[in-house]
Image: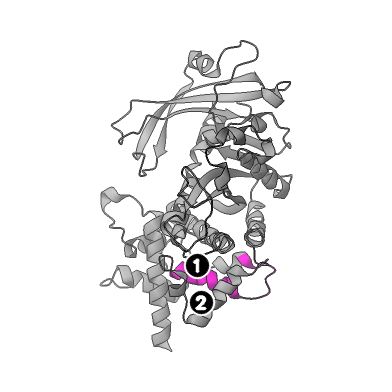
Amino acid sequence: MIGISDEFEGSEFGDKRLNRISEAFVKNSEKSIPESFEGWSEVKSAYRFMSNPKITREEILRSYTSKTVERVKEHDIILAVQDTTSLDFTSNKKTSRLGYLDQMTASEIIMHTTLATTEEGKPLGILSQQCWIREMENLDKSKKRRESPFEENESSKWIKAIEETESIIPDDIHVITVGDRESDISDLIFRERPSNSDYIVRTYHDRVISETKENMYETLEKENEASRITLEIENSSSRKGRNAVLSIRYGSYEVSGANHWKDHTAKVSAIIVNEVDVPELKKNEKPLKWLLLTSIPLNDMEVVLRVIDIYGTRWIIERFHYILKSGCKIENLQLEERQRLEVAIAVYDVIARFLLLLKYLGREFNELRSLFFLNEREWKILYKMVNKNKPLPEEPPTINEIVYMMGRIGGFLGRKSDGYPGVKTIWQGLIKLITVLEYADIFSN
């Protein structure tokens, strides 16, 4: 049913354990590894696999990113969306000490992911992923870390990810790097880029314009309002879902570098976006206010709106990390060694992208009738799980209907005000469907 194991076809492991492990992880996401397998021999096989020094996170990702690039080649333009998250294993007393985040008692891995998507938000897969820990002896030495060479600084993760992305994307494909405020570093703005590479980032620093010596925020606020648009904001734990009304101003400027870039200048385009007519928001939530920098020339309003839309897709990397933590529950993994954890995380990366793809396809394809990843028997079983008293339809359901039904059996209530199922209920529905299909196979045999 599920094509997750296809992502590992290019691996050099020489056995089928990775396929069995990935399938077990899908079916038993909220269980420990011993509970995910049938019998102690399978459990030991999984542990041996993840402990084998030849089985590395890098090799699993190499196989997976090659599949990502195959999908990328089907498009003329792709987005490379970056973000950082921390994985907290402090509560797992079996895991050997990892690194700190904000306090000595923490035990965490920091992970920086670059996810390839289309401009419409279709997730294509991982292009780059870095994992590291902060050594305990460096706790409370943030100044020392800032003064270290750039290559040793955590900020270098953005450039490493861009360079890895540029090295594997074909020259005839336009790649646009998208990042949040943390990505606003001089090494991104002033570095020499290949002709097929651009960036869109939200600013952290209020840069000085070379010609006027004024701050960019101040200059942009003086520009005439170019347009007002409405942007759909997805509901989250910290954001209220709404149609935000945004006021837009933009311009193109030359900015000067500082420190080791002090002799360099760069032409940048800037867009300031302010939310107006703001409704009641969630506690501690503020109206949207973005200052976006991009290397893309803003020739007209159509390009400006496209840049804003592209930045609006950045939420997808947050959802990816959310699925890993809240859906796949990787922070609950009961593994003792860092190597085992990172191998397991690499497998879950593939699962998280698959779930993002399910939600995207479900929302985008309202009319297309396709069996997608369910055969005739499987979609009929799914249909009866949701519609016990209704006769089976003559035609297969649409992709939208398939994903919606998965959400329903995963706990989505389906009230008018509920919108479309979220990733978590789709995931839980998928697990239930797999279980029912397995029992159906047992009884049919």
Give the alpha-carbon distance from disc 1 to disc 2, as whole Å: 28 Å
Residue at image x 49%, y 81%? 40
- Which residue lies most toward the top here? 212
Residue at 72% across / 44% down in the picture? 172
Q: Is residue 109 left or right of residue 286?
A: right
Looking at the picture, tell me which residue is in the foreground, 434 or 372.
434
| Residue 80 vs residue 133, the one in the foreground | 133
Residue 95 visible within the image: yes
Q: Position of residue 86 (x, y in %)?
A: 50, 48
Question: In the rendered image, which quarter is residue 158 located in?
Answer: top right
Residue 393 appears in the picture as rendered: no
Q: Is residue 317 above or below residue 396?
A: above
User: 10 Å neighbourhood of mark 2: few (<14), some, or many (≥20)?
Assistant: some
Circle 2 residue: 43
Residue 158 as seen in the image, left or right of residue 282: right
Going by the numbered disc 1, the residue's amino acid type is Phe
Residue for badge 1: 373
Q: Nearer the viewer, residue 378 or 407?
A: 407
| Residue depth check, mark 1 versus mark 2: number of the one nearer the observer | 2
Q: Is residue 19 magenta?
A: yes
x, y (%) of residue 428? 38, 63
Q: Position of residue 48 (x, y in %)?
A: 59, 73
Helix, strand or loop status at disc 1: loop
Q: Residue at x 66, y 22 (%)?
A: 258
Position of 211 relative to 180 (above/below): above
Element under label 2? helix
Name the image quarter holding the C terminus. bottom left
